[in-house]
Amino acid sequence: MFISIIEYLYIFSTVKTLGCDVGWKRFMSSCYYFEFESVKTCYDAKSDCHSKGGYLVKIDNKVENWFSKSYLQTDNNKDGAWIGAHDTVQESNFIWESENTSFTFTDWHPDNPNDAGSGEDCASMRKLGDYNWNDASCSLLYSYICEKQK
Ligand SMILES: [Ca+2]
Ligand SMILES: [Ca+2]
Ligand SMILES: [Ca+2]
């Protein structure tokens, strides 16, 4: 029987919320909060994730990246969503805000990160680029994804 990714995720989110707070989706060993209702700067998004007991999503591998992208594709968010990577400490050296560690996996859009314009130090999954990663100005207003361990 063929099950589409959307159906699979729906089933997954319905059945596998065990161990996660209301409003959070479980996937593998983490819980995820997809904020689609409001948009925030990268800093405010990070603060909100922290206030919820989590952090901006740390994407460790292809599967977690696929899961995050798949959920973003179910929403009509305008521009994309913040993820937890930034190079605000040292230009061009991206780290995850949750642990200050560097990448084990990346999915940058071609020619990014490019630190365009007056500088881009926060990472997003950009709708325009099929939700590949893009460094963007931290003051832009985007949806965001929080993660916490279940
Ligand atoms: Ca993670
Ligand atoms: Ca930068
Ligand atoms: Ca960029």
Image: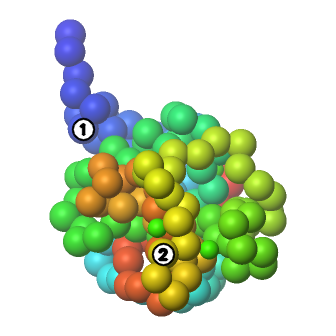
Residue 70 in the figure: left or right of residue 52: left
| Figure quadrant of the N terminus | top left
User: Within 10 angstroms of label 2, few (less than 14), some, or many (20 or more) residues?
Assistant: few
Q: Quadrant of residue 9?
A: top left
Residue 19, image x, y percentages:
58, 50
Question: Which label sits on residue 116?
Answer: 2
Image: 34 above or below 142: above
- Report helix, strand or loop for mark 2: loop
Residue 67, image x, y percentages:
43, 42
Residue 10 in the figure: left or right of residue 115: left
Does residue 112 appear in the picture of this structure? Answer: yes
Q: Is mark 2 within 8 Å of ligand 3?
A: yes
Indicate which label's residue lies in the foreground, 2 or 1: 2
94 or 71, which lies in front?
A: 94
128 or 45, which lies in front?
A: 128
Image: 136 above or below 96: below
Q: Amino acid at mark 1?
A: Ile
Residue 54, image x, y percentages:
64, 69
Counting residues from the start of the chain, the first of labels 2 and 1 encountered is 1
- Identify the residue shown where x is 55% and y is 82%: 119
Residue corresponding to mark 1: 6
- Identify the residue shown where x is 53% and y is 66%: 114
